[in-house]
Amino acid sequence: MDKWKDRKQPDTLLLFDVDGTLTPARRSVTPEMLELLRVVRKEVVIGFVGGSDLAKQQEQLGPTILSDFDYAFSENGLTAYQKGEQLESQSFIGWLGEEKYKKLVNFLLKYLADIDLPFKRGTFVEFRNGMINVAPPGRNCTVEERNKYEEYDKIHKIRPKLVEALKANFKDFSLTYSIGGQISIDVFPTGWDKTYCLKHVKNDGFKTIHFFGDKAYEGGNDWEIYNHELVIGHSVKNPDDTIKQVKELFPHLFKVGL
């Protein structure tokens, strides 16, 4: 654990989901959260893991995230950084192949075109290095529109129905479909969920790994890592709840209850 010898507990790692955990969905991190992370980082090793690419994560967590976190896991860890240095990455399209990829995207575009929603914006299928992100109302929604769609989806089950359609039509593709954020689902090879990031830390000597996430329910994109045998999972409601639970985990750092 020499690489983390500056920490009081170098064998403990805290991993955080991004949307809904460190920040409100697709919004910026607060100064209070940054201060919490700064204090905790003196004690343990910290990292984040999310489905978005690094550019989107930098928009939310700040341009210096590669130095503010010990581990940075974009696209569930398919693009990964340790101490600012990029680790080995994987490619979704390289794994699936162009023909299967086109078949999948063509199905999605036709399916989404036939859904009647209160509004539709732009970027319905976003290609990323390790997955594709599918947003029925389009990723170009405003914050207000995201909030409205999230409530609409809870009633009409647009995303769960899409997941079932994908499972029925692509049984032989070995893909996983995971609901994340407010408006979208992630599509990736089975096994390339957030547990993928654990491959990058398995030889780093951690005895305890905590994970904090707001989608820690079956079908949510935090479910697999939340339940992983090597991980202590913490289900949070929002960033304020994350702060509360981290302070309860390290009361000596924050004088909780005093």
Image (cartoon, rainbow, N blue to C red):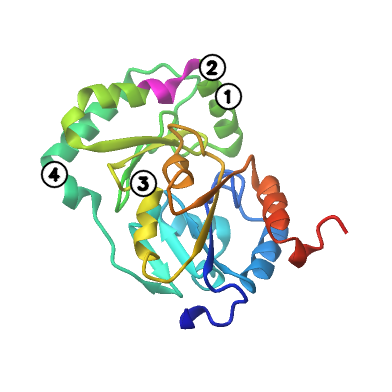
Picture residue at 62% right of the left edge, 76% below the top: 8
* Front position among marks 3 and 1: 3
Disc 4 packing (10 Å; few <14; some 14–19; many ≥20): few
Is disc 2 in contact with disc 1, using a CB cutoff of under 8 Å? yes
**Residue at point 43%, 32% (across, down):** 219
Classified by dominant secondary structure, the portion drawn in magenta counts as: helix
| Residue found 60% across the figure and 52% down from its top | 22
Q: Earlier in the sequence, mark 4 or mark 1?
A: 4
Question: Of the residues shown, which amino acid type is indicated by label 1?
Answer: Glu
Residue 86, position as x, y percentages in the image: 36, 71
**What residue does disc 3 label?**
193
**Residues at marks 3 and 2, CA–CA distance in whole angstroms:** 26 Å
- Image mark for residue 155: 2
Q: Are marks 4 and 2 in contact (CB under 8 Å)?
A: no
- Viewer-side label of 3, 2: 3
Kind of residue at disc 4? Glu
Q: Which residue is mark 1?
A: 151
Helix, strand or loop at label 1? It is helix
Q: Which residue is mark 4?
A: 98
Q: Residue 141 vs residue 88: left or right?
A: right
Mark 4 or 3, closer to the camera: 3
Q: CA distance from mark 2 to mark 1?
A: 7 Å
Quarter of the picture holding the C terminus: bottom right
In this rendered view, identify the residue nearer to me: 174 or 120.
174
Circle 4 SS class: helix
Q: Dot 1 surroundings within 10 Å: few (below 14), some, or many (20 or more)? A: some
Q: Are marks 4 and 3 in contact (CB under 8 Å)?
A: no
Q: Under tag 2, what secondary structure?
A: helix
Q: Which residues are magenta?
A: 156-161
Q: Is residue 144 above or below residue 157?
A: below
